[in-house]
Image (cartoon, helix red, strand yellow):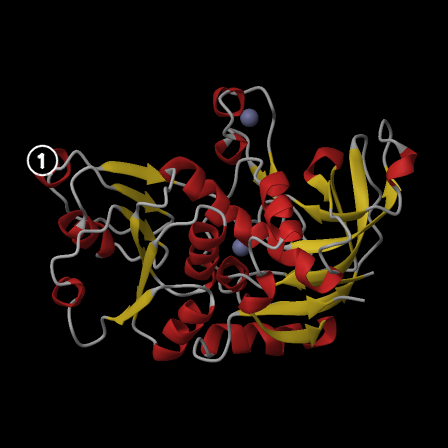
């Protein structure tokens, strides 16, 4: 089978590899589509602290089960499935409180183990979720990126009365807009970014108001409006202090970033307004919710997609994704 292998940081190649056999409790998926994410780029360039090399990248993928390991119902062969990349032990403390995404022995498919930029991949049977016919093949790899928004919003508990502010109109910001509007019916969703084309995409994804903070500070443009719910999907360490300053008393702030750089905030700035801070990593069993939203039309994954490329052009696709944020949002690989 053909797989996209990062042999070591900086070295991306399509390689011929042996067809993997599903272990006990696993399924093998013949992959149809896989989408490119910023973290794939980070692994390519050696900027992901968790990645081990050589690695087949890709954690957003969809296909059909073509073989099962010992103990898995052979009736599952042929199922159209989206694969949750979060592989957890099921019995440690975080797993026991419903947070397998921070399992003490967490393995992420496409990061710690081989992923979906490949003609086939194996995964635990419980990670392969059936995709209903209402979701077309060519959009089903986008279930995973929406689970990021599903996870953070599950903590933030949005209501229609919220005034939401989202930092960043990249793929994470856009999925958050769609979930806030389409699932939680939030009345006002404001999006801030520095790229005009991305703000246009934010509008197309349902933002009520978009603000460009490349020249004028955000505080000036908000003109006293106090967001009650803030999501940092731009993930720069300078954002949290600003978000805390702008937030309404009793606001909730959700962080998705993974920067190792410090940011400075005072206890007073948080406590005086009793601000709640939530962090969110990957997803904790949010595939069923996102599949329901997508199948019912509450969210519209096609609004994120700008390009399809055949697997053979993976390097071109990843280079475009990385270098052209004005024209690129989700880029999807057509595997076979
Ligand atoms: Zn991703
Ligand atoms: Zn665990």
Q: Is residue 221 left or right of residue 122?
A: left
Report x, y in % for residue 271: 13, 33
Report x, y in % for residue 98: 51, 26
Q: Is residue 236 above or below residue 89?
A: below
Report x, y in % for residue 299: 55, 55
Helix, strand or loop at mark 1: loop
In this figure, what is the number of numbered marks?
Answer: 1
Residue in the picture at 44% in, 75% down: 325
Report x, y in % for residue 102: 48, 33
Residue in the picture at 36% in, 45% down: 160
Question: Which residue matches tag 1?
Answer: 272
Residue closer to the observer: 154 or 185: 185
Quarter of the picture holding the N terminus = bottom right
Residue closer to the observer: 299 or 67: 299
Residue closer to the observer: 184 or 132: 184
Q: Is residue 212 above or below residue 299?
A: below
Quarter of the picture holding the C terminus = bottom right
Residue in the picture at 34% in, 57% down: 189
Question: Could you tell me if residue 283 is visible in this image?
Answer: yes
Ligand 2 placement by image quarter: top right
Q: Is residue 108 left or right of residue 214?
A: right
Packing grade of label 1 (10 A; few <14, some 14-19, many >=20) is few
Q: Is residue 5 above or below residue 68?
A: below
Image quarter for residue 152? top left
Q: Is residue 103 above or below residue 138?
A: above
Residue closer to the observer: 192 or 323: 192
Residue in the picture at 49% in, 48% down: 183
Question: Could you tell me if residue 56 is visible in this image?
Answer: no
């Amino acid at each position: 089978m053909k797989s996209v292998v990062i042999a070591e940081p900086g070295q991306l190649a399509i390689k011929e590899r042996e067809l993997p056999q599903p272990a006990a409790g696993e399924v093998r998926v013949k992959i149809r589509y896989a989408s490119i994410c910023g973290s794939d780029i980070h692994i390519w360039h050696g900027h992901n602290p968790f990645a081990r090399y050589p690695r087949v990248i890709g954690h957003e993928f969809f296909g059909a089960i073509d073989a099962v390991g010992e103990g898995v119902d052979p009736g599952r062969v042929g199922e159209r499935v989206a694969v949750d990349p979060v592989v957890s032990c099921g019995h440690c403390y975080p797993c026991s409180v419903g947070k397998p995404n921070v399992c003490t022995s967490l393995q992420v498919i496409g990061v710690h183990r081989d992923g979906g930029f490949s003609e086939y991949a194996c995964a635990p049977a419980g990670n392969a979720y059936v995709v209903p016919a209402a979701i077309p093949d060519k959009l089903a790899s986008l279930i995973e990126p929406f689970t990021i928004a599903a996870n953070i919003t599950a903590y933030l508990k949005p209501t229609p009365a919220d005034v939401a502010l989202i930092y960043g109109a990249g793929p994470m910001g856009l999925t958050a807009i769609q979930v806030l509007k389409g699932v939680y019916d939030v009345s006002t969703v404001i999006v801030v970014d520095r790229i005009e084309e991305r703000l246009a995409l934010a509008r197309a994804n349902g933002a009520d108001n978009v603000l460009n903070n490349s020249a004028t500070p955000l505080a000036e443009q908000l003109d006293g409006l106090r967001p009650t719910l803030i999501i940092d999907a731009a993930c720069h360490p300078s954002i949290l202090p600003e978000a805390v300053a702008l937030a309404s008393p009793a606001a909730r702030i959700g962080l998705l970033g993974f920067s190792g750089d410090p940011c400075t905030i005072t206890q007073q700035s948080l406590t005086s307004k009793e601000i709640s801070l939530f962090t969110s990593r990957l997803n904790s069993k949010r595939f069923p919710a996102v599949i329901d939203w997508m199948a019912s039309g509450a969210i519209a994954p096609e609004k994120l997609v700008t390009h399809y490329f055949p697997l053979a052009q993976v390097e071109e696709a990843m280079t475009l994704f990385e270098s052209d944020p004005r024209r690129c949002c989700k880029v999807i690989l057509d595997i076979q």
